[in-house]
Image (tube, rainbow, N blue to C red):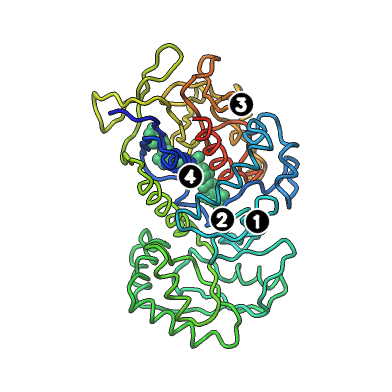
Amino acid sequence: MRFDVIVIGGGMSAIMCGIALATSGKRVALMVKGQSKLNFSSGSIDLLGYDEDGNEVEHPLDVIESLSPRHPYSKMGLANVVHNAAMAPVILEGAGLSFYGRSSDRNHYRMTPLGLLRPTWLTLDDYVAIDSQKTLSWNKVTVVSMHSFLDFPADFIASSFTRLGMECDVCDIKLGTVDKLTSNPTVMRSTAVAKLMQNDGVLNDFARKIRSKVGDAEMVVLPAVFGLDGDDTIQKIAKQIKLPVRFVSTLPPSVAGTRLLSKLRKRFVQNGGTFLLGSMVKTGKMAGGRVLSVQAKNFPDQDIEADHFVLATGSFMNGGLMSNSAGIREPIFGLDVEYLENRGEWSKENLFDAQPYMEFGVKTDNEFHAIKDGQPIENLYAIGSILSGHNSLKLADDTGVAMLTALQVARQI
Ligand SMILES: Cc1cc2nc3c(=O)[nH]c(=O)nc-3n(C[C@H](O)[C@H](O)[C@H](O)COP(=O)(O)OP(=O)(O)OC[C@H]3O[C@@H](n4cnc5c(N)ncnc54)[C@H](O)[C@@H]3O)c2cc1C
């Protein structure tokens, strides 16, 4: 098997890179082992929420040049950040996704499943997004809680609206079909509830009960358990409630993230890309400072060849990086990894401190060529959260880094 480009991974970075390459006419394959972090993501995309001193950022582009030179945004430079940040929403819209906050020069706030406000760049259109003046167009809001569904703490969310100066109440809706899921706690998750909502009878019953309880609310906030099937159930529930509706993400797994992923996958295939799902890449063959081919668990004895390779395997969570008592390694190519030698310095005792291990990742040059034994590999790039040099929890920049490095590398290829 031979392609122009092989991208290893199936998360936001891999898929953005794949779409950009396929659109420009490259024969590109995504080799994907399994789930990605998108399945946990809130429906908002962060570019840069905080600066390196921990201050909230209102205008991300003003802060890029103050980041450490090791940060992936510093490596690509401000002009490329601006260019790629303008391209990313165009690609997302091409996949049928629309967002609040399209411009990268100003953050707004998203609401977390625990009712906290976090600065972000793009928020799915039908989700709660609040601009930097902390104003919404509604004075009275009802937050709907689903009885026995514990992954949406409606009272926390309601108190956040109250803090914003809105009148807010919670209405609890009991649905027999949803209650039945509690017989197995591992099944009682947002994605299972979203599947139930694909049944018109269940959705209509839910909407009818909400209508009878919302009183004079001007806006209804629902748990994000709609849209697993595309946009159908989102449109139906909004139409039936007959009031403006906004969603807030539930605790993981995330229906919003799953919706993003499935639309982006569809777009990649429409543009001519090939998915090799269930393909865990085990090794790569190299000669003369280039990668020649990769080998995957499900294609035994086959060399899968390409002109260019892009490593988008994420960090520790999905196995892009692995650690043991000897250190930290990148398991496919054995790339150089930036980390602290002294294991005692990897983490801080206080869980809420910025954790040093979050900055560990593969080394690259400024064009994101991966480095092995001190030398950049001419046709192997690293993108997304496998990159070293930034703490994504502290800076709230992970999906921004994933998308922008993906587009930067796609343009270089
Ligand atoms: C709980 C949680 C919530 C989050 N919420 C938000 C949010 O609200 N907003 C936001 O902006 N960001 C959020 N993020 C961060 C964000 O979703 C990701 O960090 C970002 O999408 C990075 O994606 P990635 O492609 O670099 O890596 P990943 O998403 O980790 O993808 C890595 C991919 O590589 C594959 N892979 C790994 N090894 C191999 C192999 N050997 N062969 C083949 N495939 C392999 C994996 O299966 C996976 O598909 C959240 C992250 C988490 C964990």
Could you tell me how far apart the alpha carbons at marks 3 and 2 are, in whole angstroms?
Answer: 28 Å
Q: Is mark 1 within 8 Å of ligand 1?
A: yes
Could you tell me how far apart the alpha carbons at marks 1 and 3 are, in whole angstroms?
Answer: 30 Å
- Residue farthest to the top? 288
Q: Position of residue 234 (x, y in %)?
A: 44, 70
Q: Residues within 10 Å of mark 4 (few under 14, many from 20)?
A: many
Q: Is mark 2 within 8 Å of ligand 1?
A: yes
Could you tell me how far apart the alpha carbons at marks 3 and 4 are, in whole angstroms?
Answer: 21 Å
Proximity of marks 2 and 4: CB atoms separated by less than 8 Å? no
Nearer-N-terminus badge (3/2) = 2
Element assignment for label 1:
strand
- Residue 263: name its quadrant: bottom left
- Marking on residue 118: 1
Which amino acid type is marked by label 1? Answer: Arg
Q: Nearer the viewer, mark 4 or mark 1?
A: 4
Element assignment for label 2:
strand
Q: Which residue is mark 3?
A: 366
Q: Position of residue 345 (x, y in %)?
A: 63, 29
Could you tell me how far apart the alpha carbons at marks 4 and 1 are, in whole angstroms?
Answer: 20 Å
Nearer-N-terminus badge (1/3) = 1
Q: Nearer the viewer, mark 1 or mark 3?
A: 3
Proximity of marks 1 and 2: CB atoms separated by less than 8 Å? yes
- Marking on residue 44: 2
Could you tell me how far apart the alpha carbons at marks 1 and 2 are, in whole angstroms?
Answer: 10 Å
Q: Which residue is mark 4?
A: 12
Q: Nearer the viewer, mark 3 or mark 4?
A: 3
Q: Where 141 sits versus 334, above or below?
A: below
Which amino acid type is marked by label 2? Answer: Ser
Nearer-N-terminus badge (4/1) = 4
Nearer-N-terminus badge (3/4) = 4
Proximity of marks 3 and 2: CB atoms separated by less than 8 Å? no
